[in-house]
């Protein structure tokens, strides 16, 4: 999802995050990821975004992966199955296919062709996505402190490799 946000909004400049954990026995086990998290991103373009994830519905098999983009004249609702702009469907995946399937096929085709440029998000520029994710982990360790992604890349801000609230287990 971070790559998708960057596709729409450009490189991420700052990040802050809060993670929520359940105590052992309160939810599905084992869980080495936050049960709930909220991450805020500020992009070099000046745009801002928020990503929220919840894994608390352990008895309900429901999943929603959506991105909403709001601007002065447009509301875009993106999901793996369809894209809606201002209430009008502008893309609908064929039955049995969705954006994740298209992404996987594109990656496999690029590998088969030996052409890294054929991927939609080349690995070099994607380092900004990785640094933003590691920066979110470091921010959550620091109680939501706003961190510069450039400091994560430079190594002046580091994530300990342990996730806050996970009982001190090493991150997977």
Image (cartoon, grey):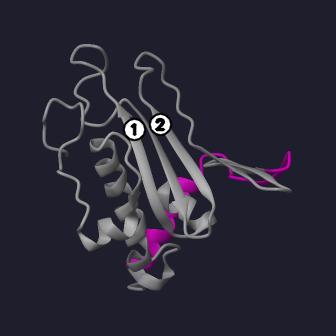
Instruction: Say whether residue 4 is visible.
Output: no
Residue at numbered disc 1? 18
Q: Is residue 169 magenta?
A: no
- All told, the count of numbered labels is 2
**Front residue (pair 21, 172):** 21
- At mark 1, the secondary structure is strand
The answer to which image quadrant residue 48 occupies is bottom right
* Above or below for 113 versus 54: below
> Residue at the spot x=35%, y=64% of the render?
131
Residue at numbered disc 2? 53
> Residue at the spot x=61%, y=69% of the render?
45
- At mark 2, the secondary structure is strand
The answer to which image quadrant residue 156 occupies is bottom left
Q: Which residues are magenta?
A: 85-111
Query: Residue 90 at x, y = what percent?
Result: 80, 56
Check whether the beta carbons of the residues at disc 1 and disc 2 lie within 8 A of each other.
Answer: no
Res 109 label: none
Sequence-earlier tag: 1 or 2: 1
> Residue at the spot x=41%, y=69% of the render?
128
């Amino acid at each position: 999802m971070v790559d998708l946000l960057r596709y729409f909004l450009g490189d991420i400049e700052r990040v802050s995050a809060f993670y929520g954990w359940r105590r052992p026995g309160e939810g599905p086990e084992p869980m080495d990821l936050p049960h709930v998290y909220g991450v805020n991103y500020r992009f070099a373009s000046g745009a801002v975004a928020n990503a929220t994830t919840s894994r608390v519905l352990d008895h309900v098999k429901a999943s929603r992966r959506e991105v909403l983009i709001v601007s002065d004249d447009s509301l875009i609702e993106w999901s793996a199955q369809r894209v809606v702009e201002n209430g009008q469907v502008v893309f609908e995946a064929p039955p049995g296919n969705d954006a994740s399937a298209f992404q996987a096929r594109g990656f496999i085709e690029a590998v088969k062709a030996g052409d890294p440029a054929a991927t939609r998000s080349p690995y070099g520029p994607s380092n900004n996505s990785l640094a933003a994710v590691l920066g979110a982990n470091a921010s959550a360790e620091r109680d939501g402190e706003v961190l510069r992604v450039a400091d994560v890349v430079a190594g002046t801000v580091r994530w300990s490799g342990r996730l806050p609230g996970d009982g001190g287990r090493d991150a997977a």
